[in-house]
Image: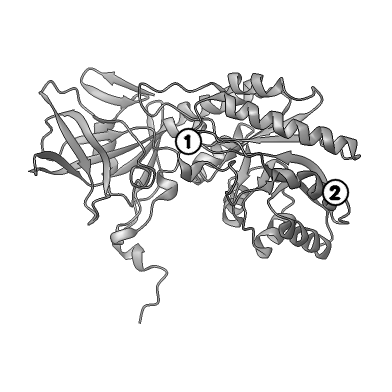
Amino acid sequence: MLNFKKKDLCIEQVKLSDIAKEYGTSTYVYSKNQFINNFESYKKALGVRGIICFACKANSNRTILKLLADIGAGADTTSGGEIYRCLNANFNPSKIVYAGVGKTFEEIEYALKNKIFMFNVESLEELDAINKIAGRVKTKAKIAFRINPYVDPDTHSYIATGKKGTKFGIPYEDAVKAYLIAKKKKNVIVLGIHSHIGSQILDIKPFKVAAQKIKKIIDDLEKNGIGLEYINCGGGLGIKYSKDQKAPSPDQLMSELFSVFDKDKKFIFEPGRSIIANAGYLLVKVIYRKFSGGKNFLITDAGMNDLMRPTLYEAYHEVMPIKKINTKKVKTDVVGPICESGDFIGKDRMLPVLAQGEYVLVTCVGAYGAAMSSEYNSRPLLAEVLVDGNKTTLIRKRAKWEDLLSNEEQK
């Protein structure tokens, strides 16, 4: 929720310059009302037909998770640590689903003991492990198989998960066989089917193709006496990172998918990026300016350890000054302080000439920004701030140098 008050860029009603003064930089800043509105658009589109489970791998800050739990969100988790975070943030265990290709035995037992809703099972060996552990702890595990429908979602290869040859899910041709095997397990309740084809998808067509292939499996299962209650359509709906992109709405996505399946089915959706990405910003300071090799550089205090997406995915994030500046725009690379040529925020951006010590804002970083950050180059993790109207709250303290050694042996 960006807007200008005279010459000052604001998030909701708070000037970014005031945030920089109070909390320093670099700092992640989130608009509470933006991600709440994003979630509510999913909730309204789904109605009473199932659960919206926030993919907390996109952003696992406890305050953000708690705010989503408070308004009825479920959680899509991919590790025991994420389940721990979600339980700590007061998510109802009956709304937590657990995905991931490499669930450890300890994580499975932890999930079962905490009575999570369902496992998205990715292999027959995982099914065996869940069945054995459930028997040992004297409970029944509710499961859905994740099926790989062999659909190319036309996104970055690193986040395309539904194509043939990826590590994810049960191969499409083995789906019915997997369910017949699961039906014989004593400690397993077969409840649903799951499919997730990738992330940052801007066209509904791949979702619908995947749904049609999943519907065929459901029909084949019913012929074999196996009825499924839940259809988990995964997540993956993209957002506008740049002005020339167009993104479908949750309502458009669901209306297309609902038309494929019978009206009595319940649904689970697992959005992450489309809820939190455009609610998050990275506020950074210009440390130095440099002209080298025919190029202009803005060297900032945010590195690739703080925001990995541009380096890892060649992802685009808009970069803008936090003040209205009327100076001439020049082509500029916005880079960080790390000793890597891959350490950049944006290349060849048309930006006004900025003074040393001024600030710029990086947009749409709420998903996979702070969540993927690291201490590479021994750089402490950043502060995170939540904006709610005219109020700000520190929701993660800025780490200090001494925190870098907190878990290391000291003599």
Q: Position of residue 328 (x, y in %)?
A: 10, 23
- On the picture, is 151 further left or further right than 117? left
- On the picture, is 345 further left or further right than 354? right
- On the picture, is 147 further left or further right than 381? right
Work out which residue is located at the far right of the displayed protein and give it: 225
**Depth check: 178 or 291 in front?**
178
- Disc 2 marks which amino acid? Leu
Q: Position of residue 285 (x, y in %)?
A: 21, 41
Q: Quadrant of residue 319?
A: top left
Q: Is residue 411 visible?
A: yes
Image quarter in which the N terminus is found:
top left
Task: List the residue tagged with mark 1.
Answer: 155
Q: Is residue 295 above or below residue 397?
A: above
Q: Quadrant of residue 259?
A: top right
Looking at the picture, the colour scheme in use is one colour
Image quarter in which the C terminus is found:
bottom left
**Depth check: 361 or 328 in front?**
328
**Depth check: 393 or 341 in front?**
341
- Disc 1 marks which amino acid? Thr
Task: Give the Cα distance between marks 2 and 1.
Answer: 33 Å
Work out which residue is located at the far bottom of the displayed protein and give it: 411
Task: List the residue tagged with mark 2.
Answer: 180
Question: How many residues crowd mark 1 within 10 Å: few (<14), some (14–19), many (20+)?
Answer: some
Q: Is residue 117 visible?
A: no
